[in-house]
Amino acid sequence: MLIKRPESYTPRGIKVAEIEDLSPEEFTAAKKKFSKMGHFSASMTPSLLGLYKGPQSVFRQMRGEEVVDFSNPKIRFGQLAEDWVADMASKMLDLDVFKEPWMLGSTQHSWITATKDFHLADNPYYEGRWGMEVKTTSSWGIRKKLGRHLSEDTAPSYYIQSQHQMYVDELDGVINPVMIITDPSALSWAVNEIEQGQEDFNAVVEEIPHEIRCFVIHRDAKFIEEMTNTLIQMREIYLRGDMPSSDMKSATVDPNRKTVSADADLYEKIESAVEKRERGRALIAEAKTIEVDVLKVLDGDGAVTWKGAEIFSVKTFNTQRLNVKRLREELPSVAQDYTVNTPSQRVNY
């Protein structure tokens, strides 16, 4: 469970700033101050390594040229839910955790910083020093990358942040509880209810479809070495006042392919489209489950009526289709003569 910090606790990283009693606004201001000084936090590292919008966006944010909207209900809910998720996860795993009161810097490179969410008290399950990094997500892009409970198969960005924290505070591992929100439509309402104090947090969460999965991430020395080497290169570029070249974002990008860097508004639109598509797929799957039940009543053929009106029907019939595969195998020249190319688009999120 979530407990009071033991008096004997001392982090291994350098104490850069005390954050225990800071409001969300004060905490954000502190992070902005240190980022302008060229400090790289754990939340920046996934983008610096090529995920999300890439290192150029991080540099613009550090220099105040690009602003993150922390009032976004998804971001704000994550801040409000952090303690609750940590407490729930620690009870699931029978662990005690306490809040990390400091922003920490690495003893090797003090500008590589981390604001660990929580630290595990002594426990019989995980040997050594362990932290806890809490996440909430409603993003389909993140959700589809999450593996099974208690595996190490978390989202790549969460894995990178956890390894960053292990480097800064010399941890042996990080527990990564993720609150997976399957329908984000209630988040704006939830944030309002919590901030207005009109509803108990548990009562609010009951209205949000979700599950909690915990991932167990061990220290990866090779990954940490590669990560720190990249951060050192990025730091040199930032201090020179330059920007990372576009080819540093991804080695697999087709140079001839048109790319457009999304602004915050376009990014939100695409995220919204992904969520709506996933919700639509979920609703269609539910409808098909209901159809199966109705078909059992009809025994595969017939109609259902309500007060004399037909509301559902099914009829079995045969259709004729050209066996294109067989045509191409047996008469390839004929198939080629009747094959036409038409432009089409495949949209991927």
Image: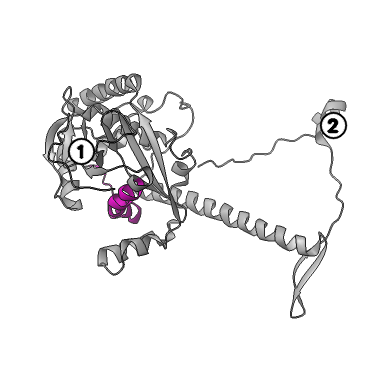
Residue range of the region highlighted in magenta in the rendering:
65-89
Determine if the magenta segment contains residue 255: no
In terms of image quadrants, where is residue 100?
A: top left
Disc 2 target residue: 326
Q: Give the secondary structure at mark 1.
A: loop
Q: Which residue lies at the image location 23% right of the left edge and 25% below the top edge?
A: 237
Q: Give the secondary structure at mark 2.
A: helix
Q: Is residue 15 left or right of residue 344?
A: left
Q: Which residue lies at the image location 45% right of the left edge and 27% below the top edge?
A: 253
Mark 1 neighbour density, 10 Å: few (under 14) some (14–19) many (20 or more): some
Q: Is residue 259 left or right of residue 192?
A: right
Residue 275: % across, % down: 48, 51
- Which amino acid does the dot numbered 1 rest on? Arg
- As drawn, the label of residue 63 is 1
Q: Is residue 77 left or right of residue 100?
A: right
- Which amino acid does the dot numbered 2 rest on? Arg
